[in-house]
Image (tube, helix red, strand yellow):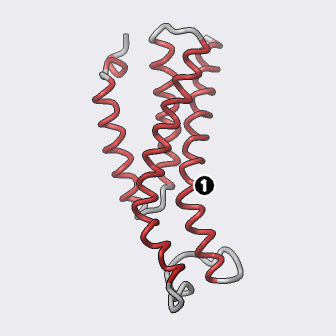
Amino acid sequence: MNKLFTINKKAGVLFYIVIDTFLVGIGMGVPFFCILLGFPVGWYLAERSVLSGKNSKDILSLILKYSIYTSLFTFMWMLLIWGPVSMMLLDPGADFANFGIPMILYDPTISFVGWIILMVFISPFLQLLTTIFASNVTLWRISKK
């Protein structure tokens, strides 16, 4: 068995927490790198699940469960970062145009709401999708061997 896959579960979770936190910091609150982290995490989950010798139904349910856990951790970070910022919506004098977010929609307030939704909800979901996609591609590649 490969030495990479002999990491115990607690060490793996701690390693993921440190890496995900680091990538949230590198992205300065924008989880782009966390979304990309879904690819190696998905590969690792699939490889480790296959090496455990479980049947395909158990492997797929484990992959889904751990993918949800990883995206929930990123979701938690996004809530901590962007939750307090979203309170600007309650301030009638808030200057959304000069806040520093891209004006992706035509109105600064609507763009701000869209940005918060993108950061808090859509980005962790994209991380979930990349993790599941990478896991399925890895399982497909393993089944070809």
Please give left or right for residue 100 compared with residue 80 in the image. Answer: right
Residue 119 is situated, as x and y percent measured from the top left of the image, at: 54, 61
Q: Nearer the viewer, residue 51 or 75?
A: 75
Q: Quadrant of the C terminus?
A: top right
Could you tell me which residue is drawn at 35 percent across and 51 percent down?
A: 21
The image shows residue 95, relative to residue 59, as above or below, that is below
Whole-percent x and y of residue 126?
A: 59, 47
Seen from this angle, which residue lies furthest front? 90
Residue 67 vertical placement versus 97 (above, below): above
Residue at 55% x, 67% y: name it. 116
Q: Foreground residue, 33 or 105?
A: 105
Query: In screen coordinates, is 127 left or right of 73?
Result: right
Residue farthest to the right?
106
The number of numbered badges drawn on the structure is: 1
Q: Position of residue 2 (x, y in %)?
A: 37, 15
Question: Picture coordinates of residue 54 (x, y %)?
Answer: 52, 9
Which type of secondary structure does the marked residue at label 1 adopt? helix
The residue pinned by badge 1 equals 122
For disc 1, the neighbor class at 10 Å (few under 14, some 14 to 19, many from 20) is some
In this rendering, the answer to whether 131 lies above or below 52 is: below
Q: Is residue 141 left or right of residue 19?
A: right
Q: Residue at x 33, y 24 (%)?
A: 9
Of 53 and 109, which appears nearest the observer? 109
Q: Quadrant of the N terminus?
A: top left
Q: Residue at x 51, y 55 (%)?
A: 32
Tell me the amino acid under the disc marked 1. Ile
> Going by the image, does 14 lie left or right of 86?
left
